[in-house]
Amino acid sequence: MIECKNVSKIYLGDSPALENVSFRIEDKEFVSIIGASGAGKSTLIKILHAEERPTSGEIIFDEDDIVEYKKKQIFQHRRDVGVVFQDFKLLPKKNVFENVAFAMEVAGKTDAEIAEDVPKVLEIIGLEGLEDKYPHELSGGEQQRVAIARALINKPKVLIADEPTGNLDPESGWEVLESLLKINKYGTTVVLATHDREAIDRLNKRVIVLKDGKIISDKNNGKYDLDEK
Amino acid sequence: MRLNFPRTLKTGFKNFYRNGWLSVATISIITVTLFIINIQFAVVISDNLLLNDIKDRVSISVYFKPETTEQDVLLAKEDFGKYQEVASVEYISKEKALEDFKIENADNDIMLKSLEEIETNPFNPTLSVKAHEPRDYELIARAVNDSSYSEFIDTVNYDKYSKVINSLGDEIDANKQTGLALGITLAIIAILITFNSVRITMYAHSREIEIMRLVGASNNYIRMPFVWEGIFYGFISAVIAIPLSFVYLKFVAISEASGVALPISNSVYIKQFLENIFLQNAFKIVPAELGIGILLGAMSSIIAMGRYLGKPRK
């Protein structure tokens, strides 16, 4: 469960990036956050991932307020929350297996655990057989799915995806979204920030609309409408 | 988390050898620093050996008038020996002085002949007084002159050496200070160079560092490979600098033909240093030097990483 209570973020000398944002996401939900550029999507994602601290407000993950987290808890939080970006952020000199294994190494898992878990996740995401390929040998959709595999490898309860389809053609984009739907079905909460209209309309899931740092709409089975009241 | 140790070590080693010429340059400058510190250290120590040796050979000679009885001289010996500043007093009788002179000049016919012509023993009974500290010779000489034995004393000879010793001592002190300043300066330069090398590696790996943070790596986990890299630089430099310094001192500094003039010290004392001090204490000196190398490298890396990592959350 994630609950944001009156979260605001004000950058120095700027109008607020987020203003009194409150919402609650239940376990195993699939929630999309949409909004025009500068609406505050990225800021919200960064705050949920503990890369940035809100100026005010609380962010409750299960029972803890992550705003209060100390260094060590922040590192642990990032291992508990998988994250996927528009530009994939894969290491070019590591192959698919190593890119996914990397997140387990950082979390201090043994080589035996790595050898067991990585192939499983690659299979779920549909990347079996590509273990030895390097990122430049893969299509954009495949690269994004490697990133999803890496985000999932430490068995997070929540997966945050920030514009995961932004660099992909519609078909690859849809493949990536299907992967997200699949892992959501297996029980991972998914938070998707996007302005991919087609994706939102096709997903037919809960949609939160941000405008100028405020929530203007929050509906189940939402459609892509940035001005909806 | 115990797995972090081998993993970060491996990554650090990879960074190190993939850096190629950058690693070579970094190691070179640390090696030169350690080498110069080593040589300076050897020179200061052998200077001290030289100074002690000279101190040992120097004494005040108190020449008594020829007619002084042995009893009076021995009384004087006992009294002078009581001075706090005096280390030892040796009595050299007229006969002993003559004998020593004959032995010293055994090859010198003219000397021996002229001695025969005099027929009597021209030497005075003498006390040879040694001080604990060279600067006390003047004080001792004055005390001897002012003592109740002054009527028996012919001459007191001391200043011939004490000035030399004092100036030698001053020079060695100055040498120590120059050496220390030089060592510190070079150490700072070495730290800056290593710092720079680690920075360059860090920028080359900035994407990897960013991704490490995203997947929840702790600052320590991110920092360790770079600290290892610095440790490799320092360790390898020390491994090179120790034998290099040894070989330099043994074959270059000592060889008379090489024309290398080290300040003050002559080759005898460098040799003494190598044989009696370095080789005897190698099991302490070598680890200490490796430690200094490792410390230099690790410190540079930690400084280089410091500001880059900063707070985990903005």
Image: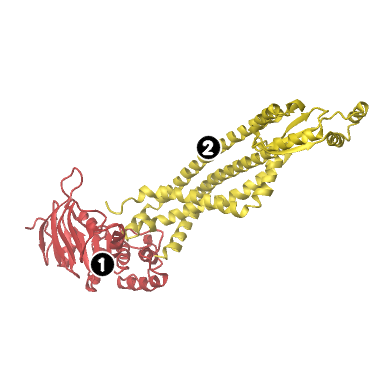
Query: Which quarter of the figure has residue A77?
Result: bottom left
Query: In the picture shown, does residue B123 fall above or below A134?
Result: above
Q: Which residue is mark 2?
A: B181
Query: Which chain is disc 2 placed on?
Result: B
- Chain in yellow in the render: B
Q: Which mark is residue A175?
A: 1
Image quarter in which the N terminus of chain B is found: bottom left
Query: With B128 as the anchor, is A104 left or right in this view?
Result: left
- Look at 44% across and 62% down and name the residue there: B5
Residue B104 or B194: which is nearer the viewer? B104
- Chain in red in the render: A
- Look at 70% across and 35% down and name the residue there: B80
Q: Amino acid at mark 2?
A: Ala
Binning the other alpha carbons within 10 Å of mark 1 as few (below 14), some (14 to 19) or many (20 upward) gives some
Where does the image place residue A111, in percent across and percent down from the top left? 42, 70
Where does the image place residue B14, in percent across and percent down from the top left? 47, 57
Query: Which quarter of the figure has residue A112?
Result: bottom left
Q: Which mark is residue B19?
A: none
Q: Could you tell me how far apart the alpha carbons at marks 2 and 1 are, in whole angstroms?
A: 67 Å
Query: With B267 as the anchor, is B301 left or right in this view?
Result: left
Binning the other alpha carbons within 10 Å of mark 2 as few (below 14), some (14 to 19) or many (20 upward) gives few
Tag 1 secondary structure: helix
Tag 2 secondary structure: helix
Asked if badges 2 and 1 are on one and the same chain, I answer: no
Q: Amino acid at mark 1?
A: Glu
Residue B116 showing in the rendered view: yes
Where does the image place residue B71, in percent across and percent down from the top left? 79, 35
Foreground mark, 2 or 1? 2
Query: Which chain is disc 1 placed on?
Result: A
